Image (cartoon, rainbow, N blue to C red):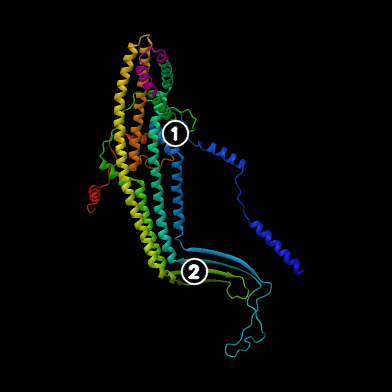
Amino acid sequence: MQYTKILITAFLTVMLLEGCNINPMPISSDERLASMAQDQVEMYAKQEPITRPLTLYDALARALKYNYDHRLTVMEAVLQDTQLEVATLNMLPKLTANAGYQFREKKLGSSSEDYFTGGNALSNSRYATSQDASRGIADLTFAWNVLDFGVSYFQAKQQADRILIAQERRRKVVNNLIKEVLQAYWSTNIADRLLPGLEPVLAEAERALVVSRTIEGDRLQPIISVLEYQRSLLRIIDQLKKLRADLLIAKPKLAGLINAPAHSNFLLAQPAVTPEPPELKNSVEELENLGLFYRGDLREEIYQERISRADVWKEMLKVLPGLTIPIGLNFDSNSFLINNFWMEAGARTTINLVNLIAAPKIWDSAQTQVEVARTRRKALSVAAVVQINVGYQQYLKALDSYKNAKELNKIDESISTVMSNNAANDAGSELERIHASTAALASQLEKEQSLADVYGAMGNIYASIGLDPATGGIEHVTVRALAVQLEKTLDSWYKGNLPKLPVMAKASVPLGNSVKQSGK
């Protein structure tokens, strides 16, 4: 019988352990297909349809409203906000309710003896009971711990700073979106205007190359001039093919930025005249000061330093004694009690003596975190200044390249016009005409691509500074209304009207002087 009990116990133990054993369960093919189909439906749902050719500002507005990278940062900010509500509630006193039922197989019996004589203190019996075999109990306790309140207070302040950090990260995503949309939009605009005419020119250039090789084989012209013609034409063809490859990926990239289906056939608004690129009118010093003030990652480090300082206060509070004040309402159905309901209150203090020993090390560690955050902000400030200067030089380079490409395009178009007017029926003049027209198209593509590079460089500067053209909530704003707001803001920026720094207090050191002093 004893052996059987052991076997049954062992069997039940094995079954219990087997039931607690958890193995990895990869997602099945059916589940993945269902998830994929659902994602494909939801990726582009709840969006305003594209009903007209997109302007630059329409594309920027759609990117800010529907791009999932931006949506994710918005949701993260909302998550941090809800966590602040939780942290605020943690500062409240604890109010706990307990209820239960207790049952004993046998009554609780006990005896007592006289303290002085050691004899039985009960007169009629050796044993007595003062508790029912079954009874219900309940209590409602209000407890407030002063130390926990202090720690929760600083945790709530830290969570408030994390909300601001999430908002700065959202601004950083907005900056990068604007930079990428500026580049992708103008590249797509160029592709829509020039790619349809590129294929016939390439085909004509390929035929001219074949004819030139025939002339080379038949020795109809000097070999050196024919080979130089082939080399020049091959370089132009290679340049055109590379530009075509770059332009072909612009539209899918723009579609991804504005969260449109990759194969959607949306159109861009074509300007009657190719716009001239805006010229930046602000000095490098102004851009540096704006970047050091507005840049999101620098503000994020300031908030991170505040979080680290709050850690110092939290560690200091943990060393202090904790005071708990409980107040409770109790109930016990025990029939032997005179009062089944009663209230009780008290006060209790506790202190962790080990924390007193470790306190200096804990404070040093917390102070080190503050210094680390401060040093990291300085390192990011240096990186920001470098990035702004590099971005400014890239803008000047792109603007100069555009001006040179524009002049070169004028010359190539003039040559192409002259060659077309002077073309005769002989193969040599026709080949020169094809060469000139191909070179004119290549220089036009180069000019238009340089224009896109200028806008991309401008967007890079705005991103380096940390300017955000979309102020206020955009969730409930239509695409068109947001586009109008963006157009107004960006046009003002293009004219050199960037945001001004707030007026500093007289006691503070001006940014320009601080930069000069740091340069010394």
Q: Nearer the viewer, residue 113 or 40?
A: 40
Looking at the image, residue 457 lies above or below residue 506: above
Visible residue check, residue 168: yes
Q: Residue furthest right?
A: 1
Instruction: Name the dominant secondary structure of the magenta segment.
Output: helix
Q: CA distance from mark 1 to mark 2?
A: 64 Å
Please, what secondary structure does the residue beneath circle 1 have? helix
Q: What range is drawn magenta here?
A: 214-234
Amino acid carrying mark 1 in the image: Lys
Which label number is shown at residue 185? Answer: none
Q: Which residue is mark 1?
A: 253
Q: Residue at x 46, y 40 (%)?
A: 68
Percent across and percent down for residue 101 are 63, 67
Looking at the image, residue 184 lies above or below residue 116: above
Q: Residue at x 41, y 40 (%)?
A: 474
Which label number is shown at residue 327? Answer: 2
- Is 225 included in the stretch rendered in magenta? yes
Please, what secondary structure does the residue beneath circle 2 have? strand
Percent across and percent down for residue 131 are 63, 75
Amino acid carrying mark 2 in the image: Ile
The reply, left or right, for residue 343 in relation to residue 29 is left
Q: Residue furthest top?
A: 425
Q: Earlier in the sequence, mark 1 or mark 2?
A: 1
Q: Nearer the viewer, residue 85 or 442?
A: 442
Visible residue check, residue 55: no
The reply, left or right, for residue 470 in relation to residue 504 is right
Q: Nearer the viewer, residue 213 or 304?
A: 213
The reply, left or right, for residue 133 in relation to residue 213 is right
Percent across and percent down for residue 205 are 41, 19
Q: Residue at x 36, y 51 (%)?
A: 301
Q: Residue at x 49, y 29 (%)?
A: 264
Tell us which disc is closer to us: 1 or 2.
1
